[in-house]
Amino acid sequence: LALRPSRGLVYIFGHDISTLPRKNTLSLRRRIGVVFQEFRLLSHLSAFDNVALPLRVTGIREANVRKHVEELLVWVGLKDHMDARPPTLSGGQQQRVAIARALSMNPTLMLMDEPTSALDPELVGDVLGVLQKLAEDGMTMIIVTHELGFAAKFADRILFMDKGLIVEEGTPQQLLQNPETDRLKLFLKQLGEMNLILS
């Protein structure tokens, strides 16, 4: 929300953020959780303190912070790692801390940028399990990913983009089994050939 679009309109919760006064964007930001590709945890803080930071900054009472953060870390499967610092955690554990931090403000919407791409293949399942629980709980998520299997499993709707433009959109079944555009057909063909080579 700090960057303004150079053209077009972006609506979030019914507000065009390109015309929204900056002072009104703070309350909007609190309703959006963001999970970055690179975790972006503070290495000198414990997992607990990384998740607690947004709550403490907003002035929530420490007793409430402790209870909420403990519940989140248990929920993402890190009950035994609350005092661990990020450098001592695996990539999957760090990403789960980042997800818990994004959830700490009880967002209405989660934005995720390639949440599994920085992980070893063995660790991807841990993060996918947390995302599956979020989906089952009804969380609205916008996820950028190149992993079509991941998108097919979790998405209600997929937008295939090329050079910053939406080329095709629809349900996973529509896009992955019956693509309409030549660009998406080519992408799926190349992906299939790559998977064949790797298998």
Image: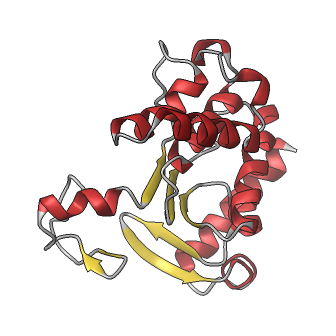
Q: Quadrant of the C terminus?
A: top right
Q: Quadrant of the N terminus?
A: bottom left
Q: Measuring 77% from the left and 30% from the top, which residue is drawn there?
A: 79
> In the image, residue 166 lies at what x, y percent?
43, 75
Q: Is residue 110 above or below residue 176?
A: above
Q: Which image quadrant for residue 29?
A: bottom left
**Left or right, residue 122 beside residue 22:** right
Give whichever of 104, 179 is nearer the camera: 104
Q: Measuring 44% from the left and 66% from the top, which residue is drawn there?
A: 162
Can residue 52 be seen at all in this image of the molecule?
yes
> In the image, residue 38 lies at what x, y percent?
50, 33
Report the number of numbered marks: 0
> In the image, residue 99 lies at what x, y percent?
59, 44
Give whichever of 168, 134 is nearer the camera: 134
Outermost right residue: 199
Q: Which image quadrant for residue 115?
A: top right
Q: Is residue 133 above or below residue 119?
A: below
Q: Which image quadrant for residue 60?
A: top left
Q: Measuring 66% from the left and 80% from the top, which residue is drawn there?
A: 175
> In the image, residue 157 lies at what x, y percent?
61, 78
Can residue 117 be seen at all in this image of the molecule?
no
